[in-house]
Amino acid sequence: GFPSLIQRKIIKEVEIRVFFFENNFFSLARKPKIGKSCKKIDWRDYNMNYESMRFFPIDIESSIIKKLKSLSKELNINTGSYDLLFSDGKYYFLEVNPHGQFGFVSSIGSYFVEQKIARFLISKYCL
């Protein structure tokens, strides 16, 4: 299997997907609606029952964004998705996917990421 390290179980309050390209970061949180259990480890285990989930844009602390930018630079990637957990006032890094999807972050968060990427590419390569 894929290498991993589990140090301890974290009771999550919110799961966060952070899509980034260049120095642009877009964050979307997800958690069960009020009254729903958050005991499932992977939010996809809700078997596409998204009505039981709440998705919302979230502002990530600037110190965390700075760390994510530093990691992106260290990994030599300029686009991808970070997965984080937030619990008890702390952020926990889960993984980075250099080919991470961003469609749901863009649409649910009303970030218009596709438009921002297009404008960036046009300004960089077409003008």
Image (cartoon, grey):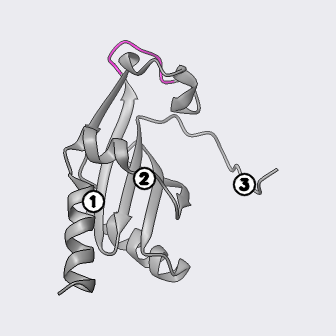
Q: Is residue 70 above or below residue 84?
A: below
Real-space CA distance between mark 3 and mark 2, rounded to the nearest whole angstrom: 17 Å
Residue bearing mark 1: 61
Real-space CA distance between mark 1 and mark 3, rounded to the nearest whole angstrom: 25 Å
| Residue at the far top in the pictured view | 35
Kind of residue at badge 2: Tyr
Residue bearing mark 2: 91
Query: What secondary structure do most residues of the magenta stretch adopt?
Result: loop
Label pair 2/1, CB-CB below 8 angstroms: yes
Image-based side of 92 in relation to 42, left or right:
left
Q: Earlier in the sequence, mark 2 or mark 1?
A: 1
Residue bearing mark 3: 5
Image-based side of 126 in relation to 83, left or right:
left
Kind of residue at badge 3: Leu
Q: Is residue 126 above or below residue 33?
A: below
Category of crowding for the residue at label 2, using alpha-carbon neighbours closer than 10 angstroms: few (below 14), some (14–19), many (at least 20): some
The magenta span reads: 33-38
Kind of residue at badge 1: Glu
Label pair 1/3, CB-CB below 8 angstroms: no
Helix or strand or loop: what does disc 1 sit on?
loop
Q: How many marks?
A: 3
Closer-to-camera residue (110/114): 114
Residue 63 picture location, percent across and down: 31, 68
Q: Is residue 79 visible?
A: yes
